[in-house]
Image (tube, rainbow, N blue to C red):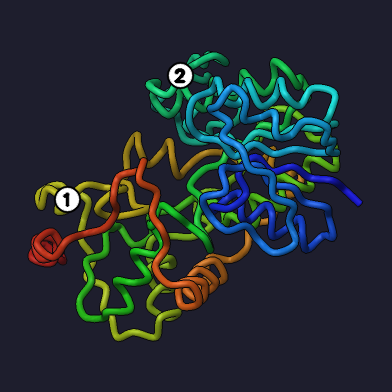
Amino acid sequence: MTRLLVLGGTRFVGRALVVDALARGWDVTTFNRGTRPAADGVTEVHGDRRDPEGLGELAGLTFDVAVDTWSDEASAVDDAARALVGRVDRFAAISSRSVYEFPQPVGADESAPTVDGDAAGGPDEEYPQRKAGGEAAATATFPDALLVRAGLILGPWEDIGRLPWWLERMAVGGDVPAPGPPDLPVQYVDVRDLAAFTLDGLTAGLAGPYDVVSRSGHATMRQVLDACIATTGSDATLRWVSPDAVAAAEVQPWTELPIWLPPGDLHDTMHRSDPSRALDAGLDPRPVTQTVADTWAWLQDEGPPAIREDRPAVGLDRDAEQRLLAHAGD
């Protein structure tokens, strides 16, 4: 039986890792502060990794593999990795494609230049530098660490609120402003596919960086939004709005219109990379209809998600929606 340690383990990516590992019959231990309930069947170890004594709660425990889901200061990844020396065989860090310098050209892959990262970096650094620093910390202690550079992550347990916002808005029905063009490619990874790739990769001995995301165009904006309408069974009608009209309405991409970025550098960087290395290594993205349907089922079962306080709120307010609808068809 594989012994897995998840640093985190109760939210989004961490929860997906735990659910997948338990389904495999693995022995799963989570380490976190204990502020949220853990999945049934895990061994919980509570401690604050920012406390100099917190990681001491793991003393005496050994594991086959460990995954760190941390997204804040790199120094915390460094401390955790050092604490696990001699007590874990393989280590994976959930990183991000945000580590790459901006902008990235269409078709960029793991060979693209990254921002500088400091393994001892603190919480005041920007997100790309924190993630790059986390990678540096992981590989300094575990040279064969698996670096999971995730793109946009969607699916059940999402605590940012991007796909949940679209689903909840479609469920209301009526005219919904849809940012175009309709065939604009979207590139993302279902959190469960990310979890499966990470666990499979650890057992297969994968090392180094992998851009874990679907191919560009795995879905389009029309397919994502159509799936939201179909899944919720609503009478919502999409009113397509051009990128120029979105700008004229002073509506912000990505935050007010979750998932969507207009054609250009931002879209090329986020939605048009080349994930061939991960796909060749076994990443198997499921259909967008399944991701959307399962996210809606989770929302119906557990209610609105607890949104992360360290990320900006997403979605349109009524005034912004009306401004966009006034431009529909432009």
Disc ID at residue 170: none
**Residue to which mark 1 is pinned:** 251
Quarter where residue 317 is shown: bottom left
Looking at marks 2 and 1 on the same chain, the residue that comes earlier in the sequence is marked by 2
Q: Amino acid at mark 1?
A: Val
Left or right relative to 265: residue 177: left
Q: Secondary structure at mark 2?
A: loop
Q: Nearer the viewer, residue 147 or 271?
A: 147
Tell me residue 290's x, y (percent).
Answer: 57, 71
In the rendered structure, are the residues bearing label 2 and label 1 in contact, judged by CB atoms less than 8 Å apart? Answer: no
Residue 18 in sight here: yes
Residue at (24% x, 53% y) in the render: 256
Q: CA distance from mark 2 to mark 1?
A: 33 Å
Residue at (33% x, 79% y) in the render: 171
Residue 171 sits above or below residue 249 on the image: below
Q: Amino acid at mark 2?
A: Gly
Disc ID at residue 122: 2
Left or right relative to 301: residue 277: right
Where does the C terminus fall, quadrant-wise?
bottom left
Q: Crowdedness of circle 1 by 10 Å Cα count: few (<14), some, many (20+)?
A: some
Residue 279 in sight here: no
Q: Secondary structure at mark 1?
A: loop
Tell me residue 265's x, y (percent).
Answer: 34, 34
Tell me residue 133's x, y (percent).
Answer: 54, 20
Residue at (31% x, 48% y) in the render: 254
Tell me residue 91's x, y (percent).
Answer: 75, 32
Left or right relative to 74: residue 170: left
